[in-house]
Amino acid sequence: MRAPLRLWQALERIPGLAAVTQEWRSLLGDEYELVEVFLRPNGKLATGYPCPEPKGCGCVHAVVEHAPDDIVAVCRCTPRRCEAIPLRRQDIVVYELNRSALGASIASALQITQDEKASVDRLPMTFRIGTYFPYAGFRFPVFMTFQIEPEEYRRVVEALVARNDKPFVLLAPTRDLHGSDCEDFLRRRDAAFFPLSEFLVWDDKGALTTNRPVEEIWSEFRQTVLPSPKDSDSMAFFPTPPGSTWGDVSIRFKDGHTVSVKMKSAGGVYNYTQMGMANKKNGEPTVQWKLLYAFSEGRGVLDWTSPHAHRKNQKRREKLAENLRSFFRIEGDPFRVTDDGKGWQARFSILPDE
């Protein structure tokens, strides 16, 4: 693996991320072949051409087209310091960065869900590339900006903080434009700044990947914005994987006060207090916890044949559903009416203690 240092530097030097091949090659050096997949012609022809001589004048030469097959780049210096440079038409084709393609590659490497690719209104060269979705119920928008001037970068940061009332993530090629004032702005929203040059590298196949485990990259942001493990006298945080449904939930009682919970890659042992079902007055299990235990004894079914049948179970079941939605952060009703219409069936697996 090797770091794409020249790519990130180039993205903060080319106005509009559009230039002729010569300029892209000059800035990217030996990374050009890797980056070429992210470049595409934008249908325009350049009116300027970078001086190609290592010891040349350094100015942007004027493109003069005498005829379709007679194109030259003329030095603008007074007096002229370079000879006119013969060009082909393909030399003045403008290639722009395919931001969607690069954004998709970055999102894949950083495990960002691509749900939006829209430009951000009135913020030039700033885009939303997706959402960081660590657990069910927690979604954080991810923005990417390409700026050249510190003032423009600062304006983008200020605008994003003003427009987002919750934490978000900002990506930029490097931290060169990211001063302490910008960091202070982001801190007001518990927002994170990721300089791509410090996290992404080229792998052996020429694709972008991370230079360390993705979980490690996100760890500081997660510690800032996600609930921390709580004491045994309050509801615990269950790390529900994104996209989970009630069918993924498995609960088994270990005893009258404790359950073992499994859901895809997540799991743990929790008591009734940690699941939000403790009576606030005396700390004893609520009737909802007792109803959950009744469902376990019926292997997920509770009807009028159950020894726990009661006319108040309708309201108790509704409250139990609220408790479970709060704990797991899964939408929808965790129970359904049984096929015969005489009881309820849990949409999740639930078993009693053995």
Image (cartoon, rainbow, N blue to C red):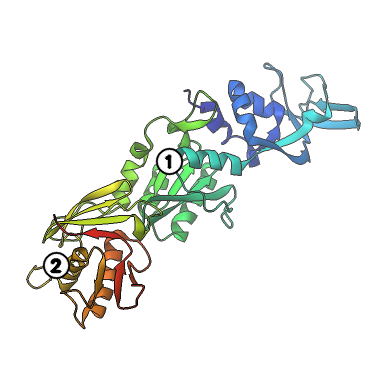
* The label number, if any, that marks residue 278 in the structure image: 2
Q: Where is residue 303 drawn, in percent x and y?
A: 25, 75
Q: Amino acid at mark 2?
A: Ala
**Towards the viewer: 140 or 127:** 140
Residue at the farthest bottom position: 311
Mark nearer the viewer, 1 or 2: 2
**Towards the viewer: 134 or 178:** 134
Count residues near mark 2 (Cα–Cα under 10 Å), then give few for <14, some for 14-19, many for 20+: many
* 11 left or right of 275 in image: right
**Towards the viewer: 44 or 59:** 44
Q: Residue at x 33, y 64 (%)?
A: 347
| Residue topped by disc 1 | 194
Q: Where is residue 114 drawn, in percent x and y?
A: 51, 49
Count residues near mark 1 (Cα–Cα under 10 Å), then give few for <14, some for 14-19, many for 20+: some
Occupied quadrant, residue 318: bottom left
Q: Residue at x 70, y 36 (%)?
A: 95
Q: Residue at x 47, y 48 (%)?
A: 113
**Towards the viewer: 187 or 51:** 187
Residue at the farthest left position: 282
